[in-house]
Image (spheres, helix red, strand yellow):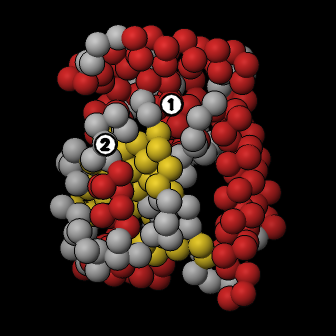
Amino acid sequence: MSVVVPVRDDGPHLWRCLRALAAQTVPPDEVVVVDNGSTDDSADIARAAGARVVFCGERGIPAAASTGYDAARGDLVLRLDADSLPAPTWVASMVAALADPDVDAVTGGAVFHDGPVVQRVMMARVFLGTYAAFAAPALGHTPLWGSNMAFRRRAWEAVRDDVHLDPELHDDLDLAYHLGERHRIRFVPGRHMRVSSRTVQPGRFARCFRRGAGTVFAHWPADIPPARWVRLARLRAGQAGAPSMRGGRGASAGAVGGGGRAGAMR
């Protein structure tokens, strides 16, 4: 299994993240660090920690994450951010959740590892609760969160040509739109991840919300919630009534949308 970490000028956080990955009870087969044009020593830190470094010259997390997923060699692809600090059980929890053959992607929550100690859990719950309250109705199913998620390689390959690479969109929410069409996403409970509270700083939070709204609107009018809900209900009803096709599932999912790789948004 592979762990993908996009990074740009975040060396100190990346160093701590890679140390935490080295302490996993179930070690990953590889760690892929995607250098998105860093001007600091992020790439050197990654190599020193034994990670495989790939370069992405197209600026933005969507392009960097996509590059990492393509470069990953494992059948399972786990994703977190450079400022994430996974608990020693994180990889094990993701792998265990994906042991269910009917689940193709999983995601989890987190608490903050910095900021006021007494507010770390509460602030994280408010932040992630706001995201879920915003994203779940838009999607019609569980959203993905890029700081703590994993999926099967074949699921990624089924949708990779449809994802948007616009740096002003949220790559995790966009991926959830595409995976959620024909792949089941499950939430993994437990405190397996800690992340930086810098996400809730006023300027960053406003940008985060703007990008989230932009990601939703990028999928309209085809994915206006009522229309999406009806389409998903029909797809799920068809899947429930059809014989198992696990071996060919990626091919059928890849036929949805069928165009180039969101070329208009690149």
Query: Which residue is located at x 73 percent, y 19 percent?
Result: 226
Question: Up-down: is 8 above or below 220?
Answer: below
Viewer-side residue, 50 vs 234:
234
What residue sits right under mark 2 in the picture?
A: 100
Question: Up-down: is 126 above or below 194?
Answer: above
Query: Which residue is located at x 54 percent, y 12 percent?
Result: 234
- Residue 110 coordinates in the image, percent (x, y): 56, 67
Task: Kindly state the secondary structure of the residue where label 2 is placed.
Answer: loop
- Residue 204 coordinates in the image, percent (x, y): 73, 63
- Residue 21 coordinates in the image, percent (x, y): 32, 73
The Cα atoms of the two marked residues, 1 and 2, are separated by 16 Å
Q: Quadrant of residue 33?
A: bottom left
- Residue 112 coordinates in the image, percent (x, y): 61, 76
Query: What amino acid is at disc 2?
Result: Asp
Please give left or right for residue 114 compared with residue 21 in the image. Answer: right
Please give left or right for residue 186 compared with residue 88 in the image. Answer: right
Question: Up-down: is 51 above or below 170?
Answer: below
Viewer-side residue, 212 vs 71:
212
Question: Up-down: is 116 above or below 189?
Answer: below
Q: Quadrant of residue 161?
A: top left
What residue sits right under mark 1 in the picture?
A: 180
